[in-house]
Amino acid sequence: MQWSEICIHTTHEAIEPISNILHESGSGGIVIEDPLELSKKRDSLFGEIYELDPDKYPQKGVFIKAYFPNDNALDEKTHHLSEKVNALKSLDIDIGENNITIKQVDEEDWSTAWKAYYKPIQISPTISIVPTWETYEPTSASERVIELDPGMAFGTGAHATTALCIQALEKYINKDDIVIDVGCGSGILSIAAALLDAQTVFAYDLDQVAVHSTEANVELNNLNHRIQAQQNDLLNGVSQQVHVIVANILAEVIVTCVQDAWHNLHDDGLFITSGIITRKKQMVIRTLEQHHFRILEVSEKDDWVCIIAQK
């Protein structure tokens, strides 16, 4: 089968929203080519070998490549993608050059090659993420391993915001806590919370593809009895009170659900938020404080921010 590779030249800030747009549009796979990977120090914790070709990376910004069947609907799909990406500017998201190019590829050229971008990764002292096709043995009795199929939906653990959220969950979650994961994506944060001894996790996402992806990854990790995934628009209509809410979504979306988060948390409950670019940190902090949250901690990685706030 012939496939088309749609390549979008954009910014680091736009990686998450554009990746989500591509997944929702039915992409058969996504690759992110980030020049920061060329200079990143690799701790060969798992014996992996990285062979990155500098010629494939932009000098500025990132390439996001997605794959779609080369059929009669391609032109219309590309047009809709361009409209949705351009609409991100109304959310004050810098989309950079936003150059979109298309080329044809054979299925065998990408259907397995993209897996080379995903290797076992140690996110925190006790959490590691391992793609389903990799063989891996835990290095200690305390290590918790998340098996993940990153081809299903956005959220592989490699992105800074995902790592920051998992590290926050590891630090603050208590045994038998009840947790809500807002915008669950591939379910990685829900699975991490359950592995860190949360009693029950409610995983919500507006995108039904993400809900199915979460369900598949939850089953893969044998956590069906602890994690409930369903389609929902943020916290709209959610009535239960919980101990922890984690939301790895856009800063502009976080500020719209702060009040709902307040109502859905027990006293002293925690709201862990990320997906926040550095320049929007103060906007989120200000909104949290206006709704009577106390900021416990702000951590940063690769120009991304994670804020832990307490009711």
Image: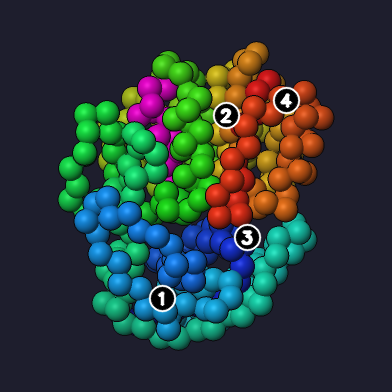
Mark number displayed over residue 13: 3
Residue 109, horizontal then vertical, whole percent: 29, 78
Kind of residue at disc 4 = Phe
Q: Is residue 295 covered in magenta? A: no
- Magenta-colored span: 185-198
- The answer to which quarter of the image holds residue 206 is top right
Q: Which residue is mark 4?
A: 293
Kind of residue at disc 2 = Ile
Disc with the residue nearer the chain's start (3 vs 2): 3
Residue drawn at 79 percent across, 37 percent down: 286
Disc with the residue nearer the chain's start (4 vs 2): 2
Q: Which residue is mark 1?
A: 69
Q: Which residue is mark 2?
A: 245
Dot 2 falls on a residue whose secondary structure is strand
Disc with the residue nearer the chain's start (1 vs 4): 1
Distance from disc 1 to disc 4, alpha carbons, whole Å, reads 47 Å
